[in-house]
Image: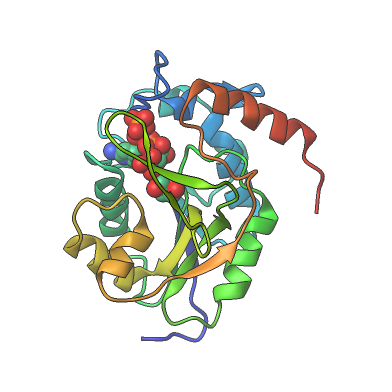
């Protein structure tokens, strides 16, 4: 199962429609600081020496990708027009598309196109902390607020203890064959870790930070702009 020098491939699912954003085009192509939102994390992934290739999973009918010039990101970047109906389908499509290239124990880092504030240190910490892990893991942050469970009328039913609760982020990093098998067997999962958990394994939580937010609603676009403009290098 283990090869001596497993490679690291990034898969960036970017075949969503951005329905919660309510914009006229999918959010991955919305302008953020003068470039398509997706370009921010692609630049960081492509510039990370540990990452060998960056596969972007686009919807089959994506007509926007070709309207932009991606040549500045170099030869690591490979578009794959094989997105599916759900995020998990898109990731699985990407994994199948790279089957000839990837070996069983190569690492795959799945990163949402909708998380433009990914920093180099996020990737390097994930890769470093999981280097000797059999299963893999995900970036995540501990829940900071007091949590309430509501009834159908938004009255509080209970306060949920937040101890040991974490918010999942991406990248999520697993071995190629383990992730592919887990996603093939899973149903209704919203992240890779859920598929791995369903296979009876325990992904590790690697602490990231709240700046790696997912752009889901219009306000998030403003937050992302602020973060990218004001980020200090670490
Ligand atoms: N069929 C899908 C659905 C989602 N994604 C990708 O998965 C990531 C996270 O999903 P989400 O934020 O839910 O994006 P959308 O599905 O585009 O948004 P919404 O749920 O609001 O429609 C995004 O980069 C999105 O492009 C994908 O590749 N294929
Ligand atoms: C993978 C993810 O970004 C982790 O927080 C999230 O699960 C994607 O969820 P969504 O339901 O597709 O927005």
Residue 183 lies in quadrant: bottom left
| Residue under the point 77% across and 40% down | 231
Q: Is residue 190 left or right of residue 3?
A: left
In this rendered view, identify the residue nearer to me: 227 or 127. 227
Residue 155 lies in quadrant: top left
Decide if residue 12 is in sight here. Answer: no
Q: Position of residue 203 (x, y in %)?
A: 42, 71
| Residue under the point 67% across and 27% down | 225
Ligand 1 located in image quadrant: top left
Query: Which part of the image, by quadrant, shows the C terminus?
Result: bottom right
The image shows residue 200, relative to residue 214, as above or below, that is: below
In this rendered view, identify the residue nearer to me: 174 or 6. 174
| Residue under the point 51% across and 33% down | 215
Q: Position of residue 230 (x, y in %)?
A: 79, 34
In this rendered view, identify the residue nearer to me: 20 or 91. 20
Q: Is residue 234 left or right of residue 158?
A: right
Decide if residue 173 is in sight here. Answer: yes
The image shows residue 168, relative to residue 211, as above or below, that is: below
The image shows residue 81, relative to residue 89, as above or below, that is: above
Q: Position of residue 154 (x, y in %)?
A: 35, 31
């Amino acid at each position: 199962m283990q090869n001596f020098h497993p490679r690291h491939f990034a898969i960036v699912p970017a075949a969503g429609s951005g329905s919660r954003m309510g914009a006229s085009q999918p959010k991955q192509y919305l302008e953020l600081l003068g470039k398509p939102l997706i370009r921010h994390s692609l630049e960081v992934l492509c510039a990370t020496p540990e990452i060998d290739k960056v596969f972007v999973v686009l919807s089959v009918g994506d007509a926007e990708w070709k309207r932009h010039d991606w040549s500045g990101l170099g030869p690591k970047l490979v578009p794959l027009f094989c997105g599916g109906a759900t995020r998990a389908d898109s990731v699985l499509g990407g994994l199948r598309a790279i089957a000839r290239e990837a070996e069983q124990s190569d690492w795959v880092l799945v990163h949402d196109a909708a998380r433009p504030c990914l920093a180099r240190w996020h990737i390097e910490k994930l890769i470093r902390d999981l280097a000797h892990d059999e299963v893999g893991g995900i970036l995540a942050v501990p829940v900071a607020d007091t949590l309430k469970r509501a009834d159908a009328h938004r009255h509080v039913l209970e306060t949920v203890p937040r101890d040991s609760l974490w918010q999942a982020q991406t990248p999520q990093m697993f071995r190629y064959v383990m992730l592919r098998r887990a996603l093939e067997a899973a149903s209704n999962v919203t992240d890779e870790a859920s598929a791995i958990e369903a296979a009876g394994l325990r992904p590790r939580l690697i602490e990231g930070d709240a700046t790696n937010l997912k752009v889901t609603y219009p306000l998030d676009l403003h937050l992302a702009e602020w973060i990218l403009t004001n980020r200090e290098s670490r």
